Amino acid sequence: MPASRIALRFFAPFDVQSGLGTGARAIYRALQQAPVELTLSTYNIGNEVHPRAPFSAPEPMLPLGQTNAADITVGFQNADGFDVFLQHTGQAFLGAARKRVAHWVWELSEFQQRWARYTPPLDEVWVPSAFVRDAIAGPLACPVQVVPYPVSVSAPAPTRFRERFEISPDEFVMCTMFDASSFVERKNPLPLFKALQTLRARGVPARLIVKVTHPHLLADYFKSKGFDASDIEALTIFNESLDHASVLGLINESDCLVSTHRSEGFGLTVAEALMLGKPVVATDYAGTRDFLTEATGFPVPHGMVAIESDLGPYRAGCLWADIDQGALIERLLEVAGNLAMARARGARGRQFILDNFSPAAVAASLVSRGLV
């Protein structure tokens, strides 16, 4: 092995079709472009609810428990499951590596102190955004470094959904997409559904395309809110499994992407839409603030509300964003009323992503900061 290359072993849910799996594969693409000798191990425990897809790589793939001579080990598993990760990886992760790294993502400004006990064996924690860094750096005893998810620059595949759903050329097509198992309450789609109704009532020929995984959870969410989406005009909800190129195609063939999230640790879909040069309207909060600004898109102001009851790892009383409904409608009207202006802003967003969040850019940042 050349002296200039270090050995890095990456444990991650490579085959899991979820936000976490997508993030893991994105980090992998950056590591491929860094001056490291990569070894991989698939760790997908705790992700049984998500579908799997075959994953192949040119690098060696080792069983979880098998040890090897690695200079750096990186475990891509969130803090709430890191104790189980350590149980299953043992010395293969801890071993004799000179640096042991966890990559964590978190969606609230308050980090649970109980998870800090997993950090003594760690030399560093990587996180995808400044928001996550600021949330968790205080309680941790090791350095926290921002290592964002690299955004793919692959070409979108044509989906021709406008033809399929018989959408006329003059309609203003908004797109949103999310995995409902990643907590519909956090994804917070209800303001967008209501905005669609308002836009159409004001004479805007708006249409909303919703790509959702685990749609039964979305139905349960609407029921809990007393909201009936069945009678909304120009609304299409579908849950077909799409490969990544087709997901990009769906975004690319829309007029804009909208995210009314309460929080995102990073916001990969928003970043991918920017990479495609699309206008993006999204809550001005959390991870997306690293790349969605007035220069690159259409951030929407918000208030803060307390979580009413425990929701998975999110504890009652913690705060997250509550998008301003009136401001959301005004931003959508701004985009719909001047698509040429919105697309010009989207083009600036694309350049910002290419300059700062491409796999090559993230790899260069890892090297320049001495992280690998």
Image (cartoon, rainbow, N blue to C red):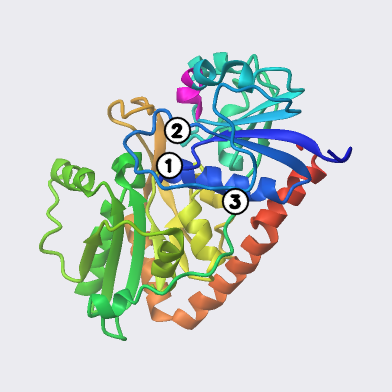
Residue that mark 3 sits on? 290
Mark 1 / mark 2, whichever is N-terminal: 1
Distance in Å between CA atoms under marks 3 and 2: 28 Å
Instruction: Determine whether, in the image, residue 101 is placed left or right of residue 249.
Output: right
Choose mark 3 or mark 2, whichever is in front: 2
Residue that mark 2 sits on? 44
User: At 47% across and 41% down in the image, what residue appears?
Assistant: 20
Instruction: Determine whether, in the image, residue 43 is placed left or right of residue 70.
Output: left
In the rendering, at what x and y percent does residue 306 appear? 35, 33
Q: The disc labelled 1 sits on which kind of residue?
A: Val
Q: Is residue 123 above or below residue 162?
A: above
Mark 2 crowdedness (10 Å alpha carbons): few <14, some 14-19, many ≥20:
some
Labels 1 and 2 touching (C-beta < 8 A): yes
Viewport quadrant of the N terminus: top right
Q: Work out which residue is located at the far right of the displayed protein and give it.
A: 3
Mark 1 crowdedness (10 Å alpha carbons): few <14, some 14-19, many ≥20:
many
User: At 81% across and 45% down in the image, what residue appears?
Assistant: 368
Q: The disc labelled 3 sits on which kind of residue?
A: Asp
Distance in Å between CA atoms under marks 3 and 1: 26 Å
Mark 3 crowdedness (10 Å alpha carbons): few <14, some 14-19, many ≥20:
some
